[in-house]
Image (cartoon, rainbow, N blue to C red):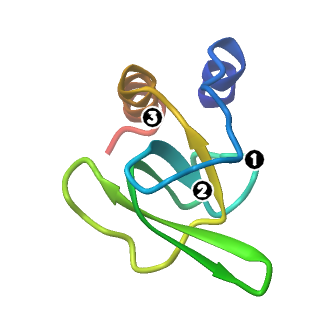
Amino acid sequence: MMNALLRRRKPRVSNRIFCGDYVLASHFSDADPRDPWVIGFVWKIESVHDTVYYYVRSDDGRCNERGFKYCRKISPEFGREWLASYEADFPA
């Protein structure tokens, strides 16, 4: 269902991501919900050896210690849909 949600409603994609942008960030480009990912605001961008890492603060205030290599700008509505879909597909 997660991939169907991404195909159905593509978030706005841009190569220009700045601090303060609301994003879906993942360690891998396929955005598989079983891989490490986070939805939140970019608080730091770091470039190391031609690789850009995005550090994201999630909605609950947690900051990741490890940067994510893949980011997509999304709307807050899309973020809420993604989280609701994740909870439906992978209950705690």
Using a 10 Å C-alpha cutoff, classify the residue at mark 2 as few (fewer than 14 neighbours), some (14 to 19) or many (20 or more).
many
Residue at figure coordinates x 52%, y 44% from the top left? 24
> Is residue 92 placed above or below 12 in the rendered structure?
below
> Is residue 13 placed above or below 4 in the rendered structure?
below
**Residue sitting nearer the eye, 44 or 27:** 44
> Is residue 35 placed above or below 1 in the rendered structure?
below
> Is residue 82 placed above or below 33 in the rendered structure?
above
Residue 14 lies in quadrant: top right
Of callouts 2 and 3, the N-terminal one: 2
Indicate the amino acid at tag 3: Tyr
Label 2 or label 3, whichever lies nearer to me, is 2
Q: What's the mark number on residue 86?
A: 3
Find disc 1 in the rendering and name its residue. Answer: 30
If the image is split into quadrants, where does the C terminus sit? top left
Indicate the position of residue 46 as horizontal and vertical percent values. 56, 77
Q: Are marks 2 and 1 in contact (CB under 8 Å)?
A: yes
Of callouts 3 and 1, the N-terminal one: 1
Residue 87 lies in quadrant: top left
Secondary structure beneath disc 2?
A: strand
Indicate the position of residue 35 as horizontal and vertical percent values. 60, 58
Indicate the amino acid at tag 2: Ser
Secondary structure beneath disc 1?
A: loop
Outermost residue on the right side: it is: 50
Indicate the amino acid at tag 1: Asp
Indicate the position of residue 21 as horizontal and vertical percent values. 43, 45
Residue at figure coordinates x 74%, y 75% from the top left? 51
Secondary structure beneath disc 3?
A: helix
Q: What's the mark number on residue 26?
A: 2
Distance from label 2 to label 1 (Cα)? 8 Å
If the image is split into quadrants, where does the N terminus sit? top right
Indicate the position of residue 65 as horizontal and vertical percent values. 40, 80
